[in-house]
Image (cartoon, rainbow, N blue to C red):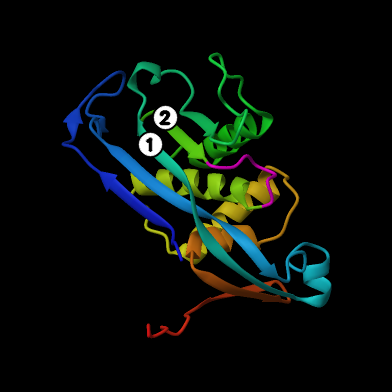
Amino acid sequence: FPSHDTMSQRGHIDDVDPQVSGLKLKVNYQGYCKTPVRLSLAGGGTDVEPFSSSHGSKVLNFAIKEFVFGEIQPNFPNIQDKPISLSIVSNSIGSGMQKNRVKSNFEILLEQKLTECFELKLPFAVSISLRTPFSPGSGLGASSSIVLTAVHLLCQLLDDTVNPLDLAKRAFEIERTQMGIAGGFQDQFACALGGICYLTAQNGVIEAEKLKLPKIKQI
């Protein structure tokens, strides 16, 4: 079963001074990340409020070999423009194929919320490019994979080391609370942990367990 994965390439650091003397910019920096989408086996919906708080949650899901791929790099030509430029392209049929693509409401809102969360931490403007196999709303947790990929790319750039559970919580906060997109918590944790996940929640405390399948001997 696939898992969440990141890879970064950091080039040499040069002194580039558009406005502030001595500003250190990672001029050759490129960060990469891929995040799986998921299928829900059982318990989907129990992770959604208000049911989760009232009755608890038990969810079983697993990641599949379909990924959101992301890349982040400096956006020096627009250093005095917006801090984060976000582009999301879907590989699904009929999505994002037009030459002059118009940004979706989801794309615009995510860019806005990422900017609000990370603007003061960024030393320079960045460009984030994401490619997803499915559009948000497909039922496979694609929107959560997109948000989590973008958040992890920014954390990579800032050398902000986060474990999968903290990453899932950050992505949940941005997508569910700040963006106001309805849904539960299983998507973010499935995307961050990968593999087969058993998720439970009681009294607001979420616990995640990755299940290991026994190896099957070939005859």
The extreme front residue here reads 219
Location of residue 92 (image quadrant): top right
Q: Which mark is residue 72?
A: 1
Residue 55 vs 113, above or below: the answer is below
Q: Earlier in the sequence, mark 2 or mark 1?
A: 1
Percent position (x, y) of residue 124?
36, 30
Residue 47 vs 109, above or below: the answer is below
Query: Exactly how many numbered labels are in the figure?
Result: 2
Q: State the residue at coordinates (66%, 64%).
A: 40
Location of residue 135 (image quadrant): top right
The reply to whether residue 5 is visible in this rendering is yes
Q: Nearer the viewer, residue 93 or 28?
A: 93
- In this rendering, position of residue 34 left or right of residue 40: left
- In this rendering, position of residue 180 left or right of residue 63: right
User: What's the magenta region?
Assistant: 133-139
- In this rendering, position of residue 201 left or right of residue 26: right
Q: Secondary structure at mark 2?
A: strand
- The residue beneath circle 2 is 127
Percent position (x, y) of residue 27?
24, 30
Distance Cα–Cα, label 2 vs label 1: 6 Å
Percent position (x, y) of residue 131?
48, 37
Label 2 packing within 10 angstroms: few (<14), some (14-19), many (20+): some
Magenta highlight: main SS: loop
Q: State the residue at coordinates (39%, 38%).
A: 71
What quarter of the picture does the C terminus occupy?
bottom left
The extreme top residue here reads 100
